[in-house]
Image: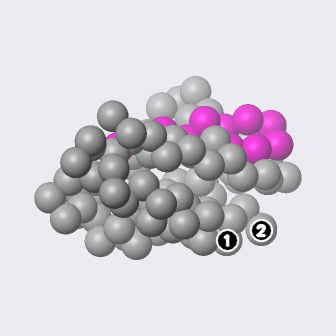
Amino acid sequence: MPKVVGTYAHSMSEEQIIVKTREAVTKLLDSFEGTDIDVVDDGKDNVGFSCKSRGFSISGKVFVEENEIKVVVDLPLLAIAFKGLVKAAMDKQIPKYLGG
């Protein structure tokens, strides 16, 4: 399964970054024209997500650390052609919510 990874700096508290990460991921999945969007805090400072977009199931996880978050999006093999578009969307949407 192809993975798209992005790392983004933040300077928020643990509580703030979880809220902002959930908002950022929801907006990111909206930009994919996602349906059946599910964004969940796993209780360990990480946020999992999934949706369906253009017939593909997309999932991933955000790993929250003290000064950065690492976003990993898992794409189905048939969606590998969209890897660059997904990375560009991540770089555009996520920093907006982190003060970047």
Looking at the picture, does residue 56 appear above or below residue 89?
above
Where in the figure is residue 99, as x and y percent of width and height? 77, 67
Residue extending farthest to the front is 81
Number of callouts: 2
Looking at the picture, does residue 63 appear above or below residue 20?
above
Where in the figure is residue 25, as x and y percent of width and height? 49, 57
Determine the main secondary structure of the stretch shown in magenta.
strand
- Callout 1 amino acid: Lys
Q: Is residue 6 visible?
A: yes
Looking at the picture, does residue 74 appear above or below residue 93?
above
Label 2 vs label 1: CA separation? 5 Å
Magenta span: 59-69
Q: Is residue 60 visible?
A: no
- Please give the name of the residue rendered at 49% of the width and 46% of the height, measured from the top-left corner: 4
Task: Give yes or no for contact between labels 2 and 1 (Cβ–Cβ under 8 Å).
Answer: yes
What residue does disc 2 label?
A: 100
Q: Is residue 74 left or right of residue 55?
A: right
Q: Is residue 25 left or right of residue 76?
A: right
Who is closer to the viewer here, 85 or 64? 85
Q: Where is the C terminus found, in terms of image quarters?
A: bottom right
What residue does disc 1 label?
A: 96
